[in-house]
Image (cartoon, rainbow, N blue to C red):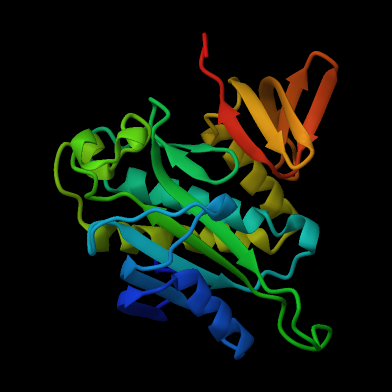
Amino acid sequence: MPEPWTTDVRRFGTIDSTNRYLLDEARAGAPDGVVAVADHQTAGRGRLGRTWEAPPGANLLVSVLLRPAIGPAERHLATTAVALAAVDAVAALGAPGLSDVSVKWPNDLVDPAGRKLAGVLAESDLARPGADDGPPDPVVVGVGINVNWPGDDTELPPELRGHAVSLRQLAGGTVDREALLDGFLVALGPRVTDLGSPSGRLRLAGDLLSSCSTVGTRVRVDLPDGSFEGTATGISPEGHLVVATGEGTRTVVAGDVVHVRPGS
């Protein structure tokens, strides 16, 4: 079996945020390769300030500290690397129902019905002085995967029923969190290596295209200055979403993307 990406795995029963912990460690000089895993987060968060609460020990809550030698315009690919490694790890479990997990651009894992299985959140610290002669600026990427919770839709708040799903639901039985973590750390190695070279970053974008359920769907893109709709037609070589609209083609660098169901 391939070696895991790192062996520096720090475990917590309860912590406010694994991302926050690693950002603090990065500011103190921690190197690339530190991983934080928690049974429970009291202040875990997602994109746009969203929160998600699960029972302690039910799901995989993990953050990784990366120091990729890439420019700010390419740092979003750290999210891609972690999302793809998570897809690889889920598939490697080998259980029926887990082979069709995909990426909803830019940072969610979903099942074939579009229900959210995991979210990925990257946070950077670009404010530290002395960057020219020190290690590359850190980026912390956290992923929360619904492993054994919810067991069924009745355990979710009414507004989330039909919109979230767990590996337990998809596999039809309890899933080993440790096996998933081990698979994730093994899968992350080549993805992190790809971050470090132009050809590798192109490969990440190509693998995202292959794994992205957003491509080919009707989408609404919500931006700070407004929204627009169109059909997602591809992923650019930089890892951005390409959307065809009535006025032409737009490339989405960042935004909240909603899959628009027919008749909605």
**Residue at the far top in the pictured view:** 263
Using the image, determine if residue 220 lies above or below residue 240. above
In which quadrant is the N terminus drawn? bottom left
Q: Position of residue 148 (x, y in %)?
A: 22, 50
Picture quadrant of residue 11 = bottom left
- Residue 133 % position (x, y): 81, 88
**Residue 98 visible at all:** yes
- Residue 231: percent from left, percent from top: 67, 19
Q: Tell me where residue 230 sits by quadrant.
A: top right
How many marks do you count on the picture? Answer: 0
Q: Nearer the viewer, residue 216 or 124?
A: 124
What residue is drawn where x is 39% and y is 59%? 184
Q: Is residue 1 visible?
A: no
* Residue drawn 41% across the image and 38% down it: 116
Q: Is residue 40 above or below residue 200?
A: below
| Residue drawn at (58%, 20%) of the image | 217
Q: In the visual, does 8 lie left or right of 248?
A: left
Q: Is residue 18 shown above or below 246?
A: below
Viewer-nearest residue: 147 or 156: 156
**Residue found at the very far front of the displayed protein:** 158
Q: Give residue 235's position: percent from left, percent from top.
A: 69, 34
